[in-house]
Amino acid sequence: MKVTVVGAGSWGTTVASLVAKRHDATVWAREPGLAEQINDGHVNPLYLEGFSLPERLAATDDLKAAAETAQLLIVAVPSHGFRDVLRRACPHVPPWIPVISLAKGLEQGTLLRMTEIIRELLPGHPAAALTGPNLAKEILSGKAAATVVATEDLTVAAALQEVLHRGMLRVYVNHDVTGCELGGALKNVVAIAAGMAEGLGVGDNTRAAVITRGLAEITQLGTAMGGESVTFAGLTGMGDLLATCMSPQSRNRYVGEQLGRGRSLEDVLGTMRSVAEGVRTAGVAVELGDRHGLPLPICRTIQHVIEGKISARDAYDGLRNIPAGHEADPW
């Protein structure tokens, strides 16, 4: 099979490298110099410094050439650029081939999930999401991990599972696309909150409480939007949440930690090459919470920090002042 991965960030390159072990794989890089480095030196120094890539993995900066030969298209572009890049690729995508999103975010303005954008721009193509607790560098170094390929048609899901399963990466299938995508997107907001706890030094008990209540918010909003509650207890919910909140490799956790140490958001983001999706997702989560009548205190508090209305210290003081009701309540 000929597989094209659109986006040569750390996760896109990792997935392309895994697929290249058994299939013809091409990764599209926005930066011409990066494509050349992947082809000639079999490295991606911008996002995966110190790692060697398979010699079979090809790279190009020509989106048309990358898309038109694909039998499976995997889109590894952050949510804020997802629509634009996919729109540019659309005229060159062969009919009916599956399209998989790797992005863990929600589109600002439309509030759409990435598979909804795929279905809008490429009607008739099976749309899927690959999501779970997947830290790229750990997987590329050969450590065991699990992920989920989610699409409504489980026959298609099983075929994609066969393509993506490699070595120590165990791939599960799930029909609950809504739940899987929302879990992957919303946990980034909670990870910022968990990182703030680390930066402030408020203690592991507090951090555990924030992560747990964060999972409750994710589940409440996710089920209100049509996801299944069991999904949020699985890999794409609790699993991804734990990895993102705990790992030093997590970009969203890093943002929160730096905010907790007193740095400004502008300063933190200015030093990062990769995208922290939770920064944009917080506002979308609040809009969705309003739409469904949910308070989402953690998401709202993080959005206030992002907007500069309160500090990280004020955020934790405020969370302590929220009255505690029944644990099953949405606050």
Image: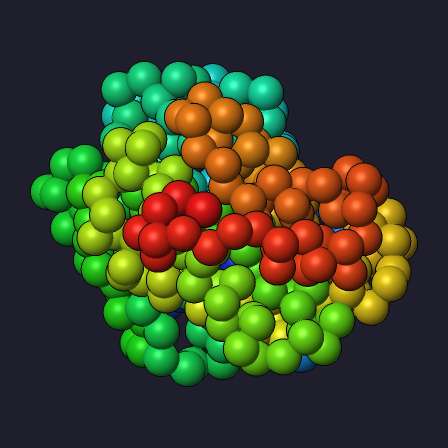
Q: Residue 329, image x and y in percent?
A: 35, 47
| Residue for point 55% across, 44% down | 297
Q: In this view, does 161 lie above or below 73?
A: below
188 relative position to 291: left or right = right
Q: Note whether 48 is above or below 126 in the view shown.
A: below
Q: Is residue 238 visible?
A: yes
The quadrant in which residue 145 appears is: bottom left
Residue 86 in the image: x percent, y percent? 51, 28
Q: Which of 11 and 329 is in front in this view?
A: 329
Task: Give the mark count.
Answer: 0
Percent position of residue 194, x then y: 60, 65
Closest to the observer: 107 or 162?
A: 107
How far across and how far down the image is residue 100, in percent? 37, 41
The way the protein has been coloured in the rendering is rainbow
**Residue in the picture at 27% in, 69% down:** 170
The residue located at (26%, 19%) in the rendering is 124
Q: Which of 32 and 111 is in front in this view?
A: 111
What residue is rendered at 63% in x and 79% in y? Answer: 203
Q: Does the rendering let one see residue 89?
A: no
Compared with 142, 118 (above or below) is above
